[in-house]
Amino acid sequence: MTKEIKIKWFLLTVVWTGCFIICYMNINIINNILDARERREILKKDTDFWRENADNISIVMEQEKFLSHATESLKLSTVFLNDIFSRVGVKHNLTELKVEMDTNQSTGDRLPVRLTFKCPFKNGLDVIRILQTEYTFLFFKRIKLEQGLSGKPAECEILMDYRYHIMNNQSSDKTGANR
């Protein structure tokens, strides 16, 4: 090969290498632009969603308050729960009512509760419905309701979490009640 042909091939290689480099740079710029557009579109959709659903979101945030029980102490909560279960037990003729709560198993915002009792089957269903609807801070994990043999009461076992949060006792600090 002559020197002239070698120079032409070298220049051709440099030109094509330059073309490939420019194409690679263009592809990176295009990908950056597409990523920015996608992020902007996601942000726009998110903003539109929050604007369109602001009323529903505020309703859900308001209802969230009822998903945990405000209490001053966990001990007071156990007394409160025992009272609830006793009142429901008397109202629905529950027998052999047992409430088991171990405060040592509390996770800071949940306390496992085991409730067992015997009653007529219909009363058991009523108790479950009442506890689920009126006491939204009780989160049911397992419900076992077995119909007894003819004439025998149904046996019910409910495993649930009591969701709570400890209130700050600022009002009593101002009055000096804790001193």
Image: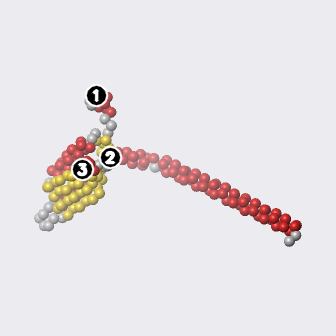
Instruction: Tell me which residue sits at (63%, 55%) in the image.
Output: 32
Judge the density around disc 2: few (<14), some (14-19), many (≥20) Cα neighbours within 10 Å: few
- Is label 3 in a helix, a strand or a loop? loop
In the rendered structure, which amino acid carries the disc numbered 2? Gly
Place residue 10 in its image quadrant.
Answer: bottom right
Q: Residue at x 87, y 67 (%)?
A: 3
Q: Amino acid at mark 1?
A: Gly
Who comes first in sequence, dot 2 or dot 1? 2
Residue 39 seen by the camera: yes
Residue drawn 42% across and 49% down?
56
- Mark closest to the chain's N terminus, 2 or 3: 3
Whether tag 3 and tag 1 are in contact, CB under 8 A, the answer is no
x and y, in percent, of residue 21 in the image: 72, 60
Q: Residue 112's x, y, as percent? A: 27, 52
Q: Is residue 27 left or right of residue 48?
A: right
Residue behind mark 1? 176
Residues at marks 2 and 3, CA–CA distance in whole angstroms: 13 Å
Q: Which residue is mark 2?
A: 108
